[in-house]
Image (cartoon, rainbow, N blue to C red):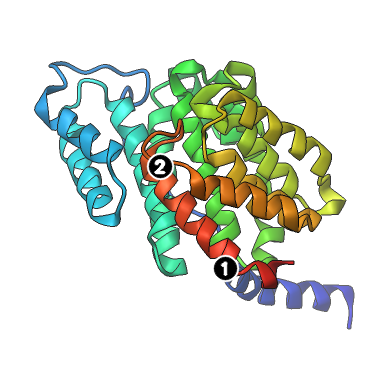
């Protein structure tokens, strides 16, 4: 077969390979949204009872019913919210939590994660310098250099949503074809580490640790660095369930440390989810997943 024929054959089969592997593609959140509706924007009026009701629902969202109610409340009040960026960030987190904790198939997860990602992008686009750069064609990772402390929450959940989507909604080929998205999450995480590594109960070093665990060995997997970052996350928030749950699920399984795996997950299960530093809405998920992981310990090691 000539070089030309091989090239034509590859071009013909490439769309099929992309479809089989999965594709990370969505309309960016800033497209179609007015300027000034993100984290830096402040509208008129006062929060009022609608926002208070949504916040109360979200803070106590220990099940799918209350989480869905909180999402509906936030979506209803978004057009008139005095601080649209804060509501967009809440919607981003809520949809990503729904995908991780309650969506029961790949399509439902993908829909939830993309919704959360787009709300986070819309919130970040409230920063005019960031918006100019992404609308000018730069990647979100490069443009994240413009983001500041005001945008750190949507940054965190953008990384979380993209990472979950990449891990749970793509096949092995998709991981290869879409790896640039992981590189972009690293850029955003490194910007967050510059801004506030202690933000959200150790979630920033935790996210970077999971990145280093998930890398292929050929692309720079670094379990030692990951362990250091997870220890930093635990030190930042000693009662948070996040770091110990994730350390067991991702690091200890990778290193084969069955004893440490059991120790971390049993600690997670022993905590009061309403009193830990990490939010109740996530703690319920962490504990449910911890029970499942312990039940499956024989298949994981």
Q: Can you say which quadrant of the picture contains the N terminus?
A: bottom right
Is 44 above or below relative to 188? above
Secondary-structure class at tag 2 = loop
Is 270 above or below relative to 54? below
Question: Residue at 11% across / 23% down in the picture?
Answer: 48
- The tag on residue 287 is none
Question: Residue at 76% across / 38% down in the picture?
Answer: 227
Q: Residue furthest front?
A: 270
Secondary-structure class at tag 1 = helix
Q: Residues within 10 Å of mark 1 (few under 14, many from 20)?
A: few
Is 227 above or below relative to 80? below
Q: Residues within 10 Å of mark 2 (few under 14, many from 20)?
A: many
Q: Quadrant of residue 41?
A: top left
Front residue of this view, candidates 167 and 137: 167
Pinpoint residue 273: horizontal percent, then vertical percent. Answer: 40, 42
Front residue of this view, candidates 275 and 54: 275
Question: Residue at 61% across / 69% down in the picture?
Answer: 296
Please report whichever mark, 2 or 1, sits nearer to the chain's N-terminal start: 2
Question: Residue at 55% across / 27% down in the picture?
Answer: 237
Pinpoint residue 216: horizontal percent, then vertical percent. Answer: 79, 54
Contact between marks 2 and 1 (CB within 8 A): the answer is: no
> Is residue 7 in view?
yes
Front residue of this view, candidates 248 and 166: 248
> Is residue 28 in view?
no
Q: Residue furthest right?
A: 2
Pinpoint residue 78: horizontal percent, then vertical percent. Answer: 21, 34
- The tag on residue 273 is 2
Pinpoint residue 147: horizontal percent, then vertical percent. Answer: 52, 21
Report, in whole angstroms, how far the alpha carbon at label 2 lies from the one at label 1. Answer: 20 Å
Can you identify the residue that label 1 sits on? 295
Front residue of this view, candidates 282 and 87: 282
């Amino acid at each position: 077969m000539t070089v030309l024929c091989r090239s034509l054959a590859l071009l013909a089969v490439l769309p099929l390979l992309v479809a089989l592997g999965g594709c990370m593609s969505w309309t960016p959140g800033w497209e179609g949204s007015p300027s000034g509706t993100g984290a830096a924007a402040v509208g008129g009026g006062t929060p009022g009872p609608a926002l208070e009701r949504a916040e109360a629902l979200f803070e106590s969202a220990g099940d799918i019913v209350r989480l869905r109610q909180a999402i509906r409340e936030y979506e209803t009040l978004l057009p008139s919210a005095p601080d649209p960026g804060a509501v967009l960030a809440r919607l981003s987190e809520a949809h990503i939590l729904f995908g991780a904790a309650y969506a029961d198939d790949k399509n439902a997860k993908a829909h939830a994660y993309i919704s959360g990602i787009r709300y986070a992008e819309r919130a970040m686009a409230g920063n005019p310098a960031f918006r100019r750069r992404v609308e000018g064609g730069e990647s979100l990772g490069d443009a994240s250099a413009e983001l500041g402390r005001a945008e750190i929450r949507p940054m965190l959940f953008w990384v979380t949503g993209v990472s979950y989507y990449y891990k749970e909604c793509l096949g092995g080929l998709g991981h290869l074809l879409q790896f640039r998205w992981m590189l972009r999450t690293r850029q955003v995480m490194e910007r967050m580490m510059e801004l506030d590594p202690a933000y959200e109960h150790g979630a920033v070093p935790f996210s970077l640790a999971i990145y280093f665990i998930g890398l292929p060995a050929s692309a720079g997997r670094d379990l030692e660095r990951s362990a250091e970052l997870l220890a930093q996350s635990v030190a930042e928030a000693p009662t948070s369930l996040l770091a110990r749950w994730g350390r067991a699920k991702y690091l200890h399984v990778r290193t084969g440390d069955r004893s440490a795996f059991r120790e971390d997950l049993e600690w997670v299960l022993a905590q009061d989810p309403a009193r830990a530093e990490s939010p109740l809405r996530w703690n319920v998920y962490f504990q449910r997943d911890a029970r499942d992981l312990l039940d499956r310990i024989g298949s994981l090691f």
